[in-house]
Image: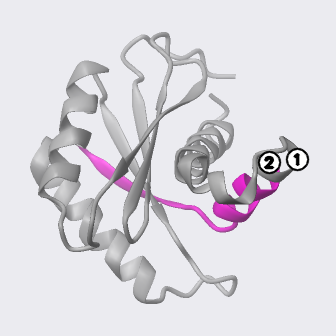
Amino acid sequence: MRKPLLADHVMALDYGAKTVGVACTDPLGLTAQPVETVWRERENKLRKTLTRIDQIARERKIRLILVGLPLNMDDSEGERAEMARAFAAQVAQRTGLPVEMYDERLSTLEADEILDESGIAADRRKNYLDVLSAQLILERYMADRDW
C-alpha cells in the first residue's frame, strides 16, 4: 500500500446540469470528504461555479482535480460525457491545475441508495446527492490507486 504524502490533496467534482458536487481529501490526504454542492441557475452559467472551485482548490492546497466522466454501461460516451470533458477543460484553465477524467458510472445511483438507506426524504436528497457522488468518485479513485 502506497503511503499518502501530505502533498496528495485531490479534489473530485461531480458535474451536473445545475450543480457540481465537490469532495476533497482530508488535510492528511487519507480520506475522501464531502465539501459542498455548488449551485447555479443554468447549465451554461459557469463563471461563479469555476470561481468557487478555484477558491476551494487554493484553500485546500489541491494538486489534482478529478472530474467524473459519465460513461454509458458499454463504455461509450454520450452528450453528458462531452459536457463533462468541456467542463474539465474550463476547470483546468481556471485553476491551472492538472485535471483528470474519472469514470463515475453509477455513482449517483449509489449515492441515492445511501441517502435512501439513511432515511433522507426524497425531496431533500438533491441537497446531498451531488456532494456524496463526488465523495464516492474520490473514494473509488483512491481505492483504484491503492491509496
- State the residue lying farthest toward the right: 117
Q: Amino acid at mark 2?
A: Ile
Which quadrant is home to the C terminus?
top right
The residue located at (53%, 45%) in the rendering is: 131
Using the image, determine if residue 142 lies above or below residue 18: above
The residue located at (65%, 45%) in the rendering is: 140
Q: Which residue is mark 2?
A: 114
CA distance separating discs 2 and 1: 5 Å
Circle 2/circle 1 CB separation < 8 Å: yes
Using the image, determine if residue 74 lies above or below residue 112: below
Q: Amino acid at mark 1?
A: Glu
Image coordinates of residue 52 in percent, x first then y, are 22, 40
Circle 2 packing at 10 Å, graded few (<14), some (14-19), many (20+), is: some
Image coordinates of residue 78 in percent, x first then y, are 47, 89
Q: Which mark is residue 102?
A: none
Q: Is residue 137 left or right of residue 102?
A: right
Q: Is residue 73 left or right of residue 141?
A: right
The secondary structure type at the circle numbered 1 is: helix
The residue located at (40%, 25%) in the rendering is: 9
Q: Which mark is residue 117?
A: 1
Magenta stretch, residue numbers: 97-114
Circle 1 packing at 10 Å, graded few (<14), some (14-19), many (20+), is: few
- Quarter of the image holding residue 11? top left
Which quadrant is home to the N terminus?
top right
Image coordinates of residue 134 in percent, x first then y, are 53, 47
